[in-house]
Image (cartoon, rainbow, N blue to C red):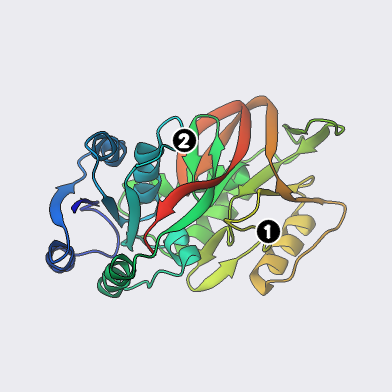
Amino acid sequence: MRALLVANPTATTTTTRTRDVIARALSSTYDLDVVLTEHRGHARDLARRARAEGLDLVVALGGDGTVNEVVNGLLGAAPAPGAPALGVVPGGSTNVFARALGVAQDPVEATGQLLDAVAAGRLRRVGLARAGERWFTFSAGLGLDAEVVGAVDRRRGAGARSTPGLFLRTAVRQFYLGTERRHGPLTLVRPGQPDVEGLFLAVVQNTAPWTYLGTRRIDPSPRASFDTGLDLYALRSLRSATVLREAAALLRGTGRTGASVLQLHDEPELVLRSQVPVALQIDGEHLGTRTSLTFTAVPGALAVRV
């Protein structure tokens, strides 16, 4: 059997020694190639080539951004029979997708889980989602959510460590000094339903949670699942009192359904449009701005060894 290990050398929690241990373990079962990513989009290109060459398994060693690129390379325009299965070994700071799958957070232990799944013949098919032409594994967001992701990326690029404190400080700064809080630019469009205008923030989830703050789950759509359609959490107001109430509810793990909150569950497709370009994040990666985007649930899209 042939496998490819795609490793991000700058992943937050992975060392060279750990990577070597993982590669040796995988080589006990697979004819293994190991490639270190060199630039954005490289993991996608490597996975695409693995699919074309008929490999059995592609293992993503890195954070959620690396996993997302590998998934997009494996699936391309559409899932295909015979495409390589995915293995995930977490190496980032948050690892939402791996945690949602029940993968251990220690990369060596996660490799052992992966090899156990191979030996037992376990292969799980999970539903994914698309935002336009881009696949995502757990969430996509438009508005303040994505603005914060972009600001955190810039801080990390300047040398800041990825910590819960960095995220919280950046979110507060962006809320008070960066985002538009008077007029919600987003409109939700669904077939057969009236449009919903005036949304400031929209988070579309393919599974739960949305993210983690340290070990704490941040779960605006706790019913989201790989086995259902899309869930939406959106805010109609960015008044300080509203945002503080919502933030407190999310940190406590208690849901809210007041007039300022729009929540939808198990939707096959959602369209979000904006009067002005708004920030977009997919699986925790900032991807510029959009004025319109269609989100689509794709059941059973991906085969995962887990």
Depicted 130 relative to depicted 26: above or below:
above
Please report the residue visible at 72 percent of the width from the left and 32 percent of the height from the top. Answer: 185
In-image side of 70 versus 288 (left or right): left
Q: Which of 224 and 39 is in front in this view?
A: 224
Residue drawn where x is 67% and y is 66% of the image: 250
* Camera-nearest residue between 69 and 113: 113
- Which of labels 1 and 2 is toward the front? 1
For the point 26% across and 37% down, the residue is: 42
Horizontal and vertical percent position of residue 6: 23, 50
Q: Nearer the viewer, residue 156 or 194?
A: 194
Circle nearer the N terminus (1, 2): 1
- Residue ID for mark 1: 221
Quarter of the figure with the C terminus: bottom left
Q: In the rendered image, which residue does mark 2 sit on?
A: 287
Name the quadrant containing residue 19.
bottom left
Number of numbered discs present?
Answer: 2
Q: Give percent across and percent down for residue 10.
A: 24, 53
Q: In which quarter of the image is the N terminus?
A: bottom left
Q: In which quarter of the image is residue 81?
A: top left
Q: Is label 2 in a helix, a strand or a loop?
A: strand
Q: In this view, does 58 lie to the left or right of 266?
A: left
* Residue 298: quadrant of the picture: top right
Q: Which of 66 and 12 is in front in this view?
A: 66
Residue drawn where x is 16% and y is 58% of the image: 30
Residue 214 visible within the image: yes
Q: How crowded is mark 1: few (under 14 residues within 10 Å), some or many (20 or more)?
A: many
Kind of residue at disc 1: Ser
Amino acid residing under circle 2: Leu
